[in-house]
Amino acid sequence: MDIEQDHPQCPEIYYLADRSIEPNDTDFSVQEPITRGEYATMLVKALGYKDVAPVNTKFTDVKNNNADSGYIQIAVEKGIVNGYDDGTFKPNQTLNRGHAATFVYI
């Protein structure tokens, strides 16, 4: 893992990595943004879902060739996330703090 032991979020990052919630166990890239698809996947994994198969979703931009699609589908079914009025989810759009709060609030 690329996180120094004295990093302020080190315990939380290792918590996610140890439980396979964080998608990459070698390079967390703490300063990098996270995408909507990655965040939905992390939230669903935190609920205990692991090794979810990709599926076609109702979103025009999230088909079964997207590795996060199964997790996105579960997140929609659980009411954790939603898409946009145009029928898209925008899985590659990066999140800001407001978006992240919305995912958790829904």
Image (cartoon, rainbow, N blue to C red):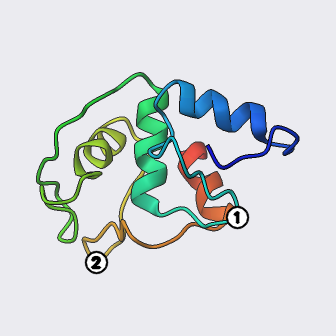
Q: How far apart are marks 1 and 2 (CA)?
A: 31 Å
What residue sits 46% from the left and 30% below the top?
20
Q: Where is residue 91 in the image (x, y as percent from the top left)?
A: 36, 65
Rate crowding at label 2 as few (under 14), some (14 to 19) or many (20 or more) other CA atoms within 10 Å. few
Disc 1 and disc 2 in contact, CB within 8 angstroms: no
Q: Where is residue 56 in the image (x, y as percent from the top left)?
A: 11, 54
Q: Nearer the viewer, residue 72 or 4?
A: 4
Tell me the tag on residue 20: none
What residue sits 48% from the left and 39% below the top?
43
Q: Earlier in the sequence, mark 1 or mark 2?
A: 1
**Residue beneath disc 1:** 31
Q: Which of 43 and 26 is in front in this view?
A: 26
Identify the image quadrant of residue 14.
top right
Q: Position of residue 105 (x, y in %)?
A: 60, 45
Q: Is mark 1 on a helix, strand or loop?
A: loop
Kindly identify the amino acid type of the residue bearing the numbered disc 2: Asp
**Residue beneath disc 2:** 86
Rate crowding at label 1 as few (under 14), some (14 to 19) or many (20 or more) other CA atoms within 10 Å. few
What residue sits 23% from the left and 34% below the top?
52
